[in-house]
Image (tube, rainbow, N blue to C red):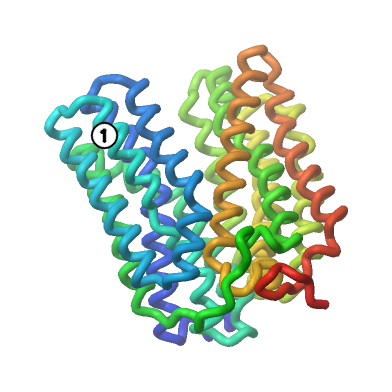
């Protein structure tokens, strides 16, 4: 762990880790906080679902546009204003919910909060090479992957705890302020010198970026169905809430493995390919299992394999993203992941409704296999490129 101690020795690195932690925790918590707030205010699960959908769709649809603006204008002129607008919209939602405002207004405020959500995590990836030497980047990316896993687990727990202690609207206020605080911290750190602007296609001018976007789409389409089908399996055992166990162990295994991969150098393209192949193999047994505990045991190994892919993505972006598109590049992967998750959730739900639970549990292996095939077939695109997206071997 000496490499991580050296990473944490630098004050800028610690500030960036804190900024990223606030972002991951806030983003992980906001979904549940929005649902709890709107449902309590309106008494309508449908309105709560629409508010969450508005936030998620708004966040994903314009993510590359926000990322491109941050690349062009920098964090102080773009990232901070996004954070302020999004935070104000979500604080407005909390106030509107407390006042019993019409569901339409609450849904609109959630949508505005999503449309303006700051690309904090994407911006953090751009800042890392400016605050640590190149030899420490693998550890930095391992920490980023770790924080993402912890935010996915800790965020909902935070929202639920604050909602129980205070009120759902109080949870929304607290969670909305976290990305604002993280953005403020990040804006005080060094930002890369301006690079030549990419063409109209931006980050997607790079064939390697298109490879990663397509692979991420397949990967998250496979795993998007787990949150839908696991409660079905758990309900058969009489405790639907136990569906959280397999997801928690998957995230925990991924978090630990992220630190291991971050401390061991390996070619990023090969790590992504081997990780996606390992993910395919470890997920194959899922379709044959019918208990929460068995699924959790398999997902321990799958989480470790997923971490290899996750860490590799951060390193690959350094190579394949055209100059001047660092923030935009990661937001394209965010958008692809969101689209894949939505498609996978819909497909898994349809399969589960038709009593094909095994088919729904087969989706993670299928998605990982398609991601592996995509990267294997287009491996030659995962090379360094210039501002125009042209490969430079």
Residue appearing at x 66%, y 41% in the figure = 297
In the image: residue 144, left or right of residue 364: left
Is 1 or 191 nearer to us in this picture?
Answer: 191
Q: Quadrant of the C terminus?
A: bottom right
Residue appearing at x 59%, y 30% in the figure = 345
Residue appearing at x 49%, y 69% in the figure = 71
Is 201 or 126 nearer to us in this picture?
Answer: 201
Is 363 or 238 nearer to us in this picture?
Answer: 363
Q: Position of residue 154 (x, y in %)?
A: 41, 50
Query: Looking at the picture, does residue 25 appear above or below residue 133?
Result: above
Residue appearing at x 45%, y 57% in the figure = 66
Q: Position of residue 392 (x, y in %)?
A: 79, 76
* Residue farthest to the front, as pictured: 200
Q: Position of residue 165 (x, y in %)?
A: 20, 42
In the image: residue 262, left or right of residue 125: right
Query: Looking at the picture, does residue 2 appear above or below residue 212?
Result: below
| Mark 1: secondary structure | helix
* Residue farthest to the left, as pictured: 99
Q: Position of residue 378 (x, y in %)?
A: 84, 56
Q: Residue 164's quadrant in the figure?
A: top left
Q: Quadrant of the N terminus?
A: bottom right
Does any portion of residue 301 appear in the rendered image?
no
Q: How many numbered dots are placed on residues in this image?
A: 1
Question: On the image, numbered disc 1 is attached to which residue?
Answer: 37
Is 138 or 70 nearer to us in this picture?
Answer: 70
Does any portion of residue 373 appear in the rendered image?
yes
In the image: residue 81, left or right of residue 321: left
Query: Looking at the picture, does residue 328 appear above or below residue 2?
Result: above
Number of other residues with Cα within 10 Å of mark 1, as a class: few under 14, some 14 to 19, many 20 or more: many
């Amino acid at each position: 762990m000496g490499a991580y101690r050296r990473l944490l020795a630098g004050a800028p690195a610690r500030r960036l880790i804190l900024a990223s932690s606030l972002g991951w925790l806030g983003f992980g918590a906001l979904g549940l906080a929005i649902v709890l707030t709107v449902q309590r205010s309106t008494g309508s699960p449908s309105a709560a679902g629409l508010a969450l959908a508005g936030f998620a769709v708004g966040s994903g649809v314009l993510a590359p546009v926000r990322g491109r603006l941050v690349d062009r204008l920098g964090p102080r002129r773009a990232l901070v204003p996004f954070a302020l607008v999004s935070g104000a919209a979500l604080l407005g939602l909390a106030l509107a919910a407390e006042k019993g405002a019409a569901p339409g207004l609450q849904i609109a405020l959630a949508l505005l909060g999503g449309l303006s959500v700051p690309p904090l995590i994407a911006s953090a990836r751009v800042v890392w090479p400016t605050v640590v030497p190149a030899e420490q980047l693998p550890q930095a990316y391992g920490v980023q992957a770790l924080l993402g896993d912890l935010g996915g687990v800790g965020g909902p727990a935070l929202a639920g705890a604050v909602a129980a202690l205070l009120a759902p609207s109080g949870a929304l206020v607290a969670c909305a302020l976290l990305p604002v605080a993280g953005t403020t911290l990040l804006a005080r750190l060094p930002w890369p010198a301006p690079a030549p602007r990419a063409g109209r296609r931006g980050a997607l001018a790079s064939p390697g970026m298109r490879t990663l976007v397509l692979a991420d789409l397949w990967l998250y389409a496979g795993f998007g169905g787990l949150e839908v089908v696991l409660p079905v399996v758990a309900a058969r055992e009489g405790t639907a809430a136990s569906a959280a166990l397999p997801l928690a162990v998957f995230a925990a295994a991924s978090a630990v493995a992220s630190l291991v991969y971050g401390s061991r150098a390996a070619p990023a393209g090969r790590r992504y390919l081997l990780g996606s192949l390992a993910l395919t193999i470890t997920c194959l047994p899922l379709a044959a299992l019918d208990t929460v505990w068995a699924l959790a045991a398999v997902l321990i190994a799958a989480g470790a394999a997923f971490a290899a892919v996750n860490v590799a993505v951060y390193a690959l972006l350094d190579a394949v993203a055209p100059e001047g598109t660092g923030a935009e590049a990661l937001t394209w992967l965010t958008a692809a992941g969101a689209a894949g998750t939505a498609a996978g959730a819909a497909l898994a739900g349809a399969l589960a409704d038709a009593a094909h639970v095994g088919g729904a549990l087969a989706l993670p292996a299928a998605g990982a296999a398609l991601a592996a095939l995509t990267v294997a077939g287009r491996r030659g695109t995962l090379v360094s490129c210039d501002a125009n997206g042209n490969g430079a071997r």
